[in-house]
């Protein structure tokens, strides 16, 4: 990373921080959501499924604007949180929130496909032997779904690293505070003689994205072999 300038390195470091927390905090919710969509039947299931996947369909700028309306200082949730000193708008935490929302559908889809592949007969056999639903989930479903969980987490991390539209709408593009890697590329392209820095950041983006995809495939195959045999 020595070939990066201070501002470029700052953007990369902030992106890694944002992607890490976006993935880490949203992963438990992703597992629960994926399990609910895979195993439960409840009223409004298709609506919940649609809402989870809505960020994949909506323009990212629209998603960012909705986050601003909801979690901004005057929003219904943001207003309450600001009273206890928690703010998202125009903060790096807001960038993490936007990245988590945009990456959540990819995470849930990967985990749900993995849970769908778990043989129901194994869960039913454990329940017949007296295991509670929570124990069945913890000892049967969750271990067998590990490949999908790893894949979902890695894909979500990569998506969070590359998130731009929702992030810049929700938290703007403040160097050192909310300027993530994609935002920095945009800013450099708007500045005179900024193409060199933009190219360097683009190269890093491509390397991280390809690395995440390859790693997700390798880990998923290894874990599938380990679980299967």
Image (cartoon, rainbow, N blue to C red):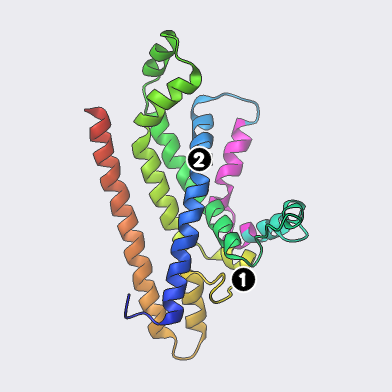
**Percent x, y for residue 226?**
24, 33
The residue at which mark 2 appears reads as 28
Give the position of the N terminus as an image quadrant: bottom left
Q: Can residue 101 be found in the magenta stretch?
A: no
CA neighbours of label 1 inside 10 A, class few (<14), some (14 to 19), many (20+): some
**Percent x, y for residue 37?**
53, 31
Q: Secondary structure at mark 2?
A: helix
Cα gap from disc 2 to disc 1, whole angstroms = 28 Å
Looking at the rendering, which quadrant does residue 174 occupy? bottom right
Instruction: Specify the label residue 44 is tagged with.
Output: none
**Percent x, y for residue 105?**
51, 46
Instruction: Specify the label residue 172 is tagged with.
Output: 1
Q: Can residue 58 be found in the magenta stretch?
A: yes
Q: Would residue 43 appear left or right of 121 to someone viewing this image? A: right
Count of numbered badges drawn on the protein: 2
Say above or below: 107 vs 213: above
CA neighbours of label 2 inside 10 A, class few (<14), some (14 to 19), many (20+): few
Secondary structure mostly seen in magenta is helix
Residue located farthest toward the front when viewing the structure as drawn: 84
Q: Would residue 168 appear left or right of 30 to someone viewing this image? A: right
Task: Give the extent of the magenta segment.
Answer: 45-63
Looking at the rendering, which quadrant does residue 64 occupy? bottom right
Among the two numbered marks 2 and 1 on one chain, the one whose residue lies closer to the N terminus: 2
Give the position of the C terminus as an image quadrant: top left
Say above or below: 226 vs 104: above
Q: Would residue 50 appear left or right of 141 to someone viewing this image? A: right
Looking at the rendering, which quadrant does residue 90 occupy? bottom right
């Amino acid at each position: 990373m020595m070939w990066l300038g201070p501002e470029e390195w700052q953007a990369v470091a902030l992106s890694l921080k944002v992607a890490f927390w976006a993935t880490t905090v949203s992963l438990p919710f992703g597992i629960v959501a994926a399990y609910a969509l895979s195993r439960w039947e409840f009223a409004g299931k298709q609506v919940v499924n649609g809402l989870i996947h809505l960020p994949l369909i909506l323009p990212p700028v629209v998603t960012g604007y909705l986050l601003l309306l909801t979690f901004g200082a005057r929003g219904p949730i943001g207003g309450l949180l600001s009273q206890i000193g928690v703010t998202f708008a125009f903060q790096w935490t807001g960038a993490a929130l936007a990245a988590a929302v945009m990456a959540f559908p990819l995470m849930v889809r990967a985990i749900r496909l993995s849970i769908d592949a778990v043989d129901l007969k194994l869960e039913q056999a454990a329940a017949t032997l007296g295991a509670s639903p929570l124990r069945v989930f913890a000892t049967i479903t969750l271990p067998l779904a590990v490949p999908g969980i790893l894949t979902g987490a890695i894909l979500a991390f990569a998506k969070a690293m590359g998130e731009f539209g929702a992030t810049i709408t929700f938290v703007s593009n403040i160097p050192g505070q909310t300027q993530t890697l994609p935002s920095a590329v945009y800013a450099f392209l708007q500045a005179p003689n900024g193409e060199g820095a933009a190219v360097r950041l683009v190269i890093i983006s491509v390397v991280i994205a390809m690395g995440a995809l390859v790693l997700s495939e390798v880990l998923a195959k290894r874990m599938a072999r380990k679980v299967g045999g």
